[in-house]
Image: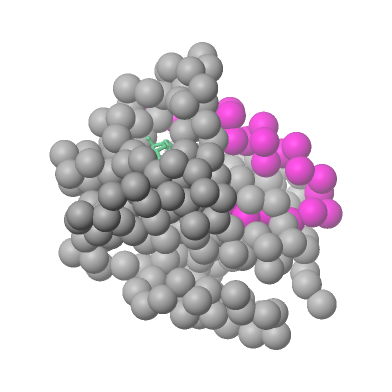
Amino acid sequence: MVDSSIRLLLFGPPGAGKGTQAKLLTEQLKVLQISSGDLFRYNLEHGTPLGQRAAAYMNQGLLVPDEITIDLFLNKILGIPKDEGFLLDGFPRTIEQANALEGALAAGSRQLDKVVFINVPEDELIRRLGSRFTCRDCQTPHTVTDGEAGVTCNSCGGELYQRDDDRPESIRQRLQVYQSKTLPLLDFYGRREMLLDIPGTGSIQCVNRRVLSALGLDNLSPI
Ligand code: AMP
């Protein structure tokens, strides 16, 4: 029986495979996924006012300021009915965001159930991000090695492109931002005894099985 009221946060460094794991878990747990990166990218691609405000930060590998981000995602999360679960992918990403989320959930007598940290060493992240191409239509990430031309999305056939922030000059910047702003969440959620530290190396299926097992959900069908 799936517990579709579970409230999860997935976090980890850029390139850890959060988005991929989030999609699998969303299907397996039958919960709503809120991906901050996907939402910002959609707005960027469509040139909305939000996208225009976020563009300069995103393209340089910086975080969009908390003044924009916190209200945006709290509104979305608080809009989810109380008895329904959710999976957060990419928000919160700073201590300020985590405090704001905790306060907002507590005001409605809710809290996160578990925080899944996908742990991948830095040299592997740099290798993965440099060869990551993303589908323009469905956002699925793909690994494209040198010399492979004209590859399309194996999920929907859409065009693949390299995100500006996956170019080499942005990658180091994003990893630095992650170290200084996001990594402190390990301690924040560790102290609340919510943290599950999952090795993120190995196949997608293998990482998925580790996450399900850490959640005590080995009975769910792995993908
Ligand atoms: P991601 O796809 O999760 O790597 O996010 C892509 C970009 O969106 C990040 O590099 C940031 O510029 C922006 N972004 C996503 N989530 C957040 C957040 N919680 N706070 C600030 N900026 C964010």
Q: Residue at x 79, y 54 (%)?
A: 84
Image quadrant where residue 144 sits: bottom left
Residue positioned most to the bottom: 219
Residue 145: give x, y in percent of width and height.
25, 59
Q: In the drawing, does residue 195 fall left or right of residue 222?
A: left
Q: Is residue 52 above or below residue 168?
A: above
Q: Quadrant of the C terminus?
A: bottom right
Q: Nearer the viewer, residue 29 or 63?
A: 29
34 with respect to 147 (left or right): right
Q: Is residue 80 above or below residue 14?
A: above
Q: In x, y percent, where is residue 171?
A: 22, 45
Residue in the picture at 76% in, 43% down = 80
Residue range in magenta is: 65-89
Q: Is residue 82 magenta?
A: yes
Give the residue drawn at x 76%, y 50%.
109
Q: Residue at x 20, y 56 (%)?
A: 146
Q: Quadrant of the N terminus?
A: bottom right
Q: Tell which of 105 and 145 is nearer to you.
A: 145
